[in-house]
Amino acid sequence: MKRREFVSSLIIGCCGVSIIDKSEADILPDFAIPPPQPHHVIDFEALGGVGDGDLSTGRGTDNASAFARAEAMAQQGYGVKFKSKSCYKTTKQINVHNMYWIGDEISSPIIFSWFSEKGQKIIGRSNQKSQLSVCIIGLTFHRCGPFAEHGIVVDNIDRLYLDIAVTSEPGSQGGAIGISPFFPENRHSRNCFIKARITNSGDYGVQFGSVSGAIVDVTANDCYREVIGIEPIVFGSLLIKFHRASNGKIFLPNLEFSTGDPILYCRGSVSRGPLKPGNHYFIIRNDDSSVSLADSRLSAINGSRLNLEDVDGEHYFARAGVVEHVVIRNASIVDNYAKKPTMYANTKGYIVITGNSGGYVEDINIEKIYIEGNQRYPTGKSFGIYVEGVSDLLLDNIKINGCDDAIVVSDGWLNGMFDEHGKPIHVENGYAKILSKNVSVVSPDLVNFRESGVLFRGGGGSLHGGRFNSIVKYSKALVRE
């Protein structure tokens, strides 16, 4: 796994991502600007595309072959133009590729799926080995039909620019936009700009599983949960055999790690020295065949090694995905009538930042969030922002109207981790607690919360000022559990 590098036009601070020249607030990193249009742009109709689809019945011309031709033309450097107000049906998943697709931002063309089996996406992962550059502007992707599951779920991205809408039928399973690694390649992505209008997202709106560098701007209506989900996952398992005579060096064949890469300690022999189940440790690459471990990424970069002389025997780790250097530039979320998908018991939060899937979260910055949680769910609770098992996070520039609990900062438990064979990854004793640490909630504007404005579960959160106003009887501005 190669070391991820963020774009050079940003500097990384302790609380977020900062533009180099703060006096010029409109300056954006390169990936937040649309890439240059290709020299050649071809109409989708010239590839056999027909925009006569009907979203309600699924009738219309199947454009699966035309989308395959569009992928072939992209290999020759062509972009694709879609006709305004047209509605294009596909019965097959479109493979993500080096693509430049243009629609109409006022009268958006619609691409919709009508799948006959589960597990497909309108745009899904590719088998291409090289990282991809993707730009889609002025299109709407609609999830409907017998299996209205995912919209755009991709990996292996070098640069992503999306200015699109993703819609769905109420109560649909799946989600709108996901950037996440897949077995067996476990490919990381970076430099993602996502401006999305989302309706009825179901399981998630925009979700990151392993991404370095992202700017998110989301407007969402009637989305049930995780309109923005920062939830890095693990890639698979790793067995390391320690020997006391090795002076703390770990010898690994086919070494794929770089200094600073995180791994999650799961379990092992009783001779474990400083290693604790559920904690991340960070690689220090010594040479092409051996590594050492550090207790933080900064320590790894500085070469400060853990003393592993007392560690012996077999120990199991998980390869940890990373979500880092993310700016939530704007999130405007209104839920009046979202329909709960049958699979999910509770909302977990309209915005979720969590380490409970075993990955590593670092450097998340918030510029503006507005949430209106009017919907009351008969089962489960409505949370505005839910933070779980994350460290060094600043929550500011937040306004929330409604929700049962407006902001929650909680300890939690690792769960839902799987190895490269799809089998559960077990942590010692079957679980491991993850702690939220140094999470600061600064001057939130919270009104009409039904139970609590800010809820701290565990000792990792602090509140600094804010406006609290709720007419709901027995509601409290701050609750600690």
Image (cartoon, helix red, strand yellow):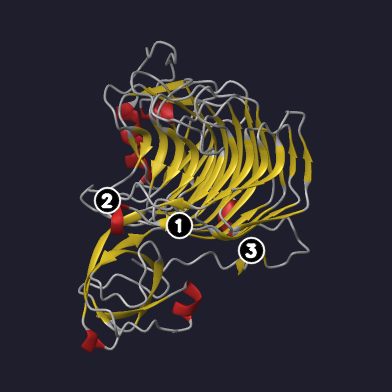
**Precedes in sequence: disc 2 or disc 1:** 2
Disc number lying in front (3 or 2): 3
Q: Which residue is mark 3?
A: 15
- The amino acid sitting under disc 2 is Phe
Alpha-carbon distance for marks 2 and 1? 25 Å
In the foreground, 80 or 252: 252
Q: Nearer the viewer, mark 3 or mark 1?
A: 1
Task: Please state which of residues 412 and 361 is positioned toward the viewer in this rendering.
Answer: 412
Name the residue: 38% across, 56% down. 432
The quarter of the image holding the N terminus is bottom left
x, y percent for residue 143:
43, 25
| Label 3, label 1: how far apart the Cα atoms are | 21 Å
Classify mark 1: helix, strand or loop: strand
Q: Secondary structure at mark 2?
A: loop
- Find residue 22 and report its horizontal and vertical position in percent: 74, 64
Categorize mark 2 by other alpha carbons within 10 Å: few (<14), some (14-19), many (20+): few
- Determine which residue is flagged by label 1: 434
Q: Amino acid at mark 1?
A: Ile
Marks 3 and 2, how far apart at CA: 32 Å
Q: Which residue is mark 2?
A: 183
Disc 1 crowd rating (10 Å Cα; few below 14, some 14-19, many 20+) is many
* Residue that appears at 42% across and 16% down: 53
Q: Position of residue 92 (x, y in %)?
A: 30, 29
